Amino acid sequence: MRASLASSIAVACAAALALPVTLVAPATATARPAANALPPAQDELPGSTQSLPLRPLGASVRSFGDPGAAAREQGLGRRDVRPFSLVGVVWDDPAAELHGTVQVRTRATADGVWSAWQDVETHNEEHGADPESAEGAAGTLRGSTAPLWVGDSDGVEIRVRAEEGAPVGTAEGTTEGAAERAPEARTATAPLPAGLRLELVDPGEEPAAAPAPGTRAMAPPAVLTAAEAAASGVNSRLAPYGATVIPAAPRDDTVAAPVHETAAEPAAGEAAAAQTAAAPVREAAAKKPYIGPRPRIITRKGWGADEKIREKGFVYTKTIKAAFVHHSATGNNYTCGQVPSVLRGIYRYHVKSSGWRDFGYNFAVDKCGNIYEGRAGGVAKPVLGAHTLGFNTNSMGVAVLGTFTSSTPPAAAVTAVARLTAWKLGLHGIDPKGTQTLVSGGGNLYKKGRKVRFHTIAGHRDGFATDCPGGRLYNKLGTARASSAKYQGR
């Protein structure tokens, strides 16, 4: 993802996602308590985040560098910690860049075996809210690496080293207009950012098991919390309140409708914003015949999002003109049954560690081809995300879960991207094989206000000096565009 972000869950697995999330206490201890374990969790929400400052390593880590570079090496030696499944590194200044390498190794809870060293993508700056948006200007923001999924673990070791003499900001994308970009050509070695901290995320418990066939699939709407009702209500035209899945539907059942109100209705501001955002979608869908069938989408309720940790309210853009495809850079060592936990981990990392208002991407796709609702606000609505710095306005972000720099994305994932974009872009009258012009919000390869033409389905690297979505996935975008257009009937 920054610097250099895959799956049908089996029927039994999908059924396991059917009831509302229950508040649970965070994990308290490991099977191997130790004096150097981290302090208690930072809050009482489902799941937890352990945050520990890094310190200079110097010559003690002989396998990782020149002793003379100790001032530019930080990390932590092996230590016991409370259980976690996802790791990342954050720092104080969101505008500061980490030019260097981050590597971690973890100890599996199940058998106590330590993993090999794994790379964490530093993915400097290129994800996040546009600079002058309310979210982008929030004082809570931090710099952060990509999160890495490591599975159930209770021990960790980390090392971070600044890169020597590497050019900064000179990578070029392939989008039309690249010749007009003005990247900086710095070659000096930048020091490590201040305030480096290791973040260890426990995604929390799985949602409760589904009821037996023939019984009620959910509790009455009145039992939903206000935050859950708000997140679910914006999809009420497509699925009942509290639904864990928005079912697939033909072309004639894709138009968003007003928010449905119940005893647990969304807050007035959220409902009004959703109503306003729905209107242009309905109008475009009524005028344009090329709308792909709506794919099956697992809701935030389905993957167990804790709606209380995000900011209240929803933020919308005017329309959706383009889709930016990413890889999550969380690694490929996950099963499709683990995806709800992976998403809860990423969500918590985005909000609690990176300081974003919500999950960054509008949608996620796993290796089995399942599609998941990402940022709250309604899957059929133009929700403003924090996925492609400077180009979040009038676009959507789709993260394929995994790392595809050298691994080929599964065909199921590419097909899911095509099906999702055929529907969502179709709601706004957009041809997946065409091009669209977006206006840069700054903070990327283009000056603020520059009009940039992109493929309608673009890769993140087209707007920023990044490897994202990885070369192997980027090379599949042509296939996704052609398939998406076919799903639209073009």
Image (cartoon, rainbow, N blue to C red):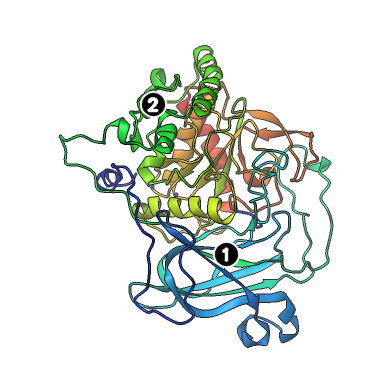
Q: Residues within 10 Å of mark 1 (few under 14, many from 20)?
A: many
The kind of residue on which mark 2 rests is Ser
Residue that lies at the very extreme toward the top in this rendered image: 287
Across and down, in percent, residue 305 comes to 42, 46
What is the secondary structure assignment of the residue under circle 1? strand
> Who is closer to the viewer here, 232 or 395?
232
> Which numbered tag is attached to residue 300?
none
- Structural distance between the alpha carbons of marks 1 and 2: 38 Å
Q: Quadrant of residue 174?
A: top right
Which residue lies at the image location 15% right of the left edge and 34% below the top edge? 214
The kind of residue on which mark 1 rests is Val
The residue where tag 1 is placed is 120
What is the secondary structure assignment of the residue under circle 2? loop
| Left or right side of 456 for 206 | left
Which residue lies at the image location 84% right of the left edge and 60% below the top edge? 186
Across and down, in percent, residue 266 comes to 44, 29
Residue 7 visible to the viewer? yes
The residue where tag 2 is placed is 236
Is residue 392 shown above or below 283? below
Residue 150 visible to the viewer? no
